[in-house]
Image: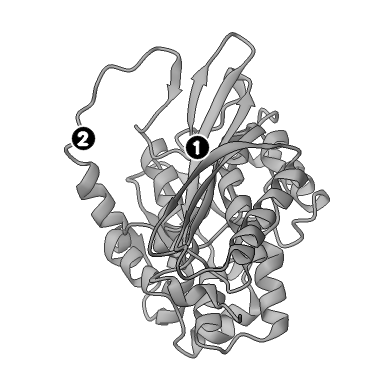
Amino acid sequence: MDIKLTQFSHGGGCGCKIAPAVLTELLANTPLRSMPKELIVGTETSDDAAVYKLNDEQAIVATTDFFTPIVDDPYDFGRIAATNAISDIYAMGGRPIMALAVVGMPLDKLPLEVIRSILAGGESVCAEAGIPIAGGHSIDVLEPIYGLVALGLVHPQRVKRNSGAKAGDVLILGKPLGVGILSAALKKGLLTPEGYATMLRHTTKLNTPGTRLAEMDGVHALTDVTGFGLAGHLLEICRGSRLAATLRFADLPLIPEAVGFVREGISTGASTRNWSGYGTDVALPAGAPEWQQKLLTDPQTSGGLLIACAPEAEQAVLAELHGAGFAEARAIGRFEAGLARVEVV
């Protein structure tokens, strides 16, 4: 049976995240209860994971991420979803130690071999990260859903939050933008085999440098770029750190195939929702074409690390990323004192 997983998805990958404006409204009246002093990272600054201090040397990093299919191949879907989930551990500076599977499948529509292939894809990535899938939970639902609860360890003094950036810090991006646009082209039947291979290469590459970057004194803040796009996740750092950021569009690493598609008007609905949610805090150059806005808001599934570091640490950070195979990593902007907003130049 020829099964196309994306036919079951109303929105694939991190593009199916709840829109920023809606999420803000949902959480606006959430009661703030007293938190234990050991919880050193919670929900207060939209960080990638929760961090709970165990002792003076160890803290547990806990996160979960799951979504509907972004590709048709079940094994590839499992790989992408697992890579994306584990990324949040690296984005806090942690080292993953184990995972639990989150599985929701329409059992009346998908053959068991397809579901097994999804699980095998996720397990292959966990093996690459050096961790076991130690359990999980499964339910019968209308759309295929797969992801992980990921757990990791970090030294309490090495936790990298998105609120730690400092004025004058350099902004570095680890992976090129455009994955969401490629997924939109795939759904339309326009993506070439070469484009699909590019998409898979980026979405299944683990952000392992995050663990080592956390050990650098010059690295002040870390996050990863996912469903809210580059502009959205950069704004989270700006708001958490109470800084403004300048973004140099010409220096952004971009996937060439994605640029071609977005210039032809192909993008995701999530990109539009993202701009509606935070566009008032992003200043584009006068006369900037709409496709540039679409790239800045493009939802990245398993996107790159976004790093704020001291200028003197820039070359060491880039050397770490390039040495780990992130050839497109580059400096793309700077933080400065000011209101929490992003200016694109």
> Does residue 135 appear in this view?
yes
Residue where numbered disc 2 is placed: 30
Relative to 202, is 335 on the left or the right? Answer: left
Q: Pinpoint residue 319: horizontal percent, then vertical percent.
A: 79, 47
Q: Give 26 or 224, whichever is nearer the viewer.
A: 26
Q: Which is more toward the observer, 11 or 246?
A: 11
Quadrant of the frame with the N terminus: bottom right
* Residue 165 in view in this figure: no
Mark 2 belongs to which amino acid? Thr
Residue 226 at x, y percent in the picture: 50, 56
The residue under the point 56% across, 47% down is 85
Q: Which of 330 and 1 is in front in this view?
A: 1
Seen in the picture, residue 287 relative to 312 is either above or below; the reply is below
| Picture layout, residue 249 above or below residue 242 | below
Q: How many marks?
A: 2
Residue at the extreme right:
323
How far separated are the C-alphas under marks 2 and 1? 19 Å
Identify which residue is drawn at 61% across, 66% down: 114
Asked if residue 73 lies left or right of residue 53, the reply is: right
Q: What residue do we see at 47% from left, 62% from top? A: 107
Task: Rate crowding at label 1 as few (under 14), some (14 to 19) or many (20 or more) other CA atoms within 10 Å.
Answer: some
Find disc 1 in the rendering and name its residue. 63
Q: Where is residue 3 in the image (x, y as percent from the top left)?
A: 57, 77
Image position, residue 318 (x, y; %): 74, 49
Q: What element carries label 2?
A: loop
Residue 333 bears which disc, if any? none
